[in-house]
Amino acid sequence: MSVVAGAGPVSGNDDTAWFFEGTARGEFLLQRCPQGHWNRPQAARCAECDSTELVPEPASGRGRLISWAVVHPRPGTDSPPPPSVPAIVELDEGPWWWTILVGTDPAVLRAGMELALAFERPEGSETVPVWTVAGG
Amino acid sequence: MTRTNHSRRAVIAGLGLTEMGPVYGRSSASLAEEAVRLAVADAGLAMTSVDGLLTSAGISGGVGLGLQRDLGLRDLRLLSEMQGFGSTAAGMVQYASMAVEAGMAETVACVFADAPLRPGGSAQEVYSRGRPGSSRGGSPPPSGWGGLLASAGVNGANTMYALAARRHMERFGTTTEDLAAVAVAQRAWAAGNPRAQYREPMTVEDHHRSRWIAEPFRKLDCCLVSNGGVAVIVTTAERAASLARPPVHVLGWAQCHPGRSLERNPDFGLVTGAARSGPEALAMAGVGRSDIEVVELYDCYTFTVLVSLEDYGFCAKGEGGAFVSSGATAPGGTLRLNTGGGQLSAYYMWGMTPLSEAVIQVRGEGGERQVHPHDLALVSGNGGILDHHATLILGSGPV
């Protein structure tokens, strides 16, 4: 398995504090409206019914790979960092999530692969949701 | 849109291009000023004739309302800074056309300029905003939802377009050889363009040997970066009849902004806004796609060309790869596409690259690379991550 980079650090702010409280507990929080529609965490209104009464609820942590990129470091250093694999995941709940794949050989990736949620806590960072190939 | 008064119909009467490429020691504002002065002179006009000005800044900024003062323009009847990223240039021509057709202005200069390159700097540095966890000189990590995206390395155009391209490849079987075919064909066109930054021949093997940037993109899948400025003058057909250059008639136009960035989007990487703006612009012009003789598509990446070809209907959806790999878009092929080398090989002036080449071709001033016939051209602008589209249909005369 080739080595790929993990997530970088991120700070919380007023918009994201509730989300990172969830990741610190090992939960990836989406938002649900009173009719049960699932929305991405940054949504202010339900994408289906326009409700503003969105309540955080943990996602299952299951999803499928929509697309990915393998981003290579700029050349020129003696010990270049490994490539990183930003990706788009279709969550089982419906929303798409732009994230990073870790612990994965990019050569095995195919659209539609089952993915599983994991968490990383880079130094000086909030806990970050990341994704791996399920059973990989 | 209802267009009835033929004498007031919009034309492009002037084109100004500064030196473009690694042009150092010039501000973007100075390049913008020169481009407008060149375009006004090209049209055979005096600067005092200009009564409208639309400006478009690139990534280095610095081009805006102050250009009026730099050009000494008084009592303008139209002035605004425009922003639709790579769709801005075509958009400016659309707004300028509406202004002159409505009688709001008579002669509108539309200008883009940028100067992001510095001596010794790299083109990639200019547009890539770093990798996950990249150092920011001891500053705190990024915050907010954008900070979370940055922590995953989901930032910068290279990465976002790579995600789009990979989805197309997975869905339709598009290959890296197909992407290479776009780059190779445009380099062959660039050989005939004296303004092109890269004119030496390129092979598929050259493409494959260039280093990975963000897979599936290699370096030769990515546009270059240029300093420079381009301006066009939009006026009425009546006014242009007595001017210096063959008028390029603005026959049809449309925009489409899908508005689904970073959301669940079944079209992501597969269908762009050009699928809507293309047919609408053709309908406005009263022509069919098969009537188009010159095609100038926005080409920030090889993939952008491929998916745009499908969306405009020059090949079937999903068959863009096979179409470009057949050689259809290379010189001597069936479709005259990006005939000056585009942003991949000639110069990166955002939407002004396809627009300027279309004006040159419709006028018949393409020299070695001039195509025949050249009476009807389609110009496509694309901005953001396939988020903003603007289409123009240009012609040598009214339809």
Image: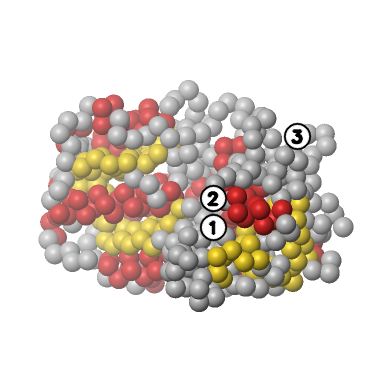
Q: Residue at x 44, y 40 (%)?
A: B58
Total numbered badges shown on the rendered structure: 3
Please name whichever residue, B272 or A13, is drawn nearer the observer in this view of the structure.
A13
3 and 2 marks on the same chain: yes
User: Do residues under tags 2 and 1 come within 8 Å of each other at their CB atoms?
Assistant: yes
Callout 2 crowding tier (Cα within 10 Å): few <14, some 14–19, many ≥20? few
- Can residue B248 be seen here? The reply is no
Q: Which residue is drawn at 62% across and 27% down?
A: B120
State which tag comes first along the sequence, 3 or 1.
Answer: 1
3 and 1 marks on the same chain: yes
Quickly name the residue at label 2: A15
Q: What element carries label 3?
A: loop
User: Do residues under tags 3 and 2 come within 8 Å of each other at their CB atoms?
Assistant: no
| Position of residue B75 in the picture relative to residue B91 (left or right) | left
Please name whichever residue, B360 or B87, is drawn nearer the observer in this view of the structure.
B87
Quickly name the residue at label 1: A42
User: Do residues under tags 3 and 1 come within 8 Å of each other at their CB atoms?
Assistant: no
Residue B168: image x %, image y %? 61, 67
Residue B259: image x %, image y %? 44, 61
Which label sits on residue A18? none
Residue B324: image x %, image y %? 57, 65
Q: In which quarter of the image is the N terminus of chain A?
A: bottom right
| Position of residue A83 in the picture relative to residue B391 (left or right) | right
Q: Would you identify the image quadrant in which residue A69 lies?
A: bottom right
Chain of the residue under the numbered disc 2 shown in the image: A
Callout 1 crowding tier (Cα within 10 Å): few <14, some 14–19, many ≥20? some
How far is disc 3 from disc 1 in space, using C-alphas? 37 Å
Dot 2 amino acid type = Asp
State which tag comes first along the sequence, 2 or 1.
Answer: 2
Quickly name the residue at label 3: A76
Please name whichever residue, B234 or B147, is drawn nearer the observer in this view of the structure.
B147
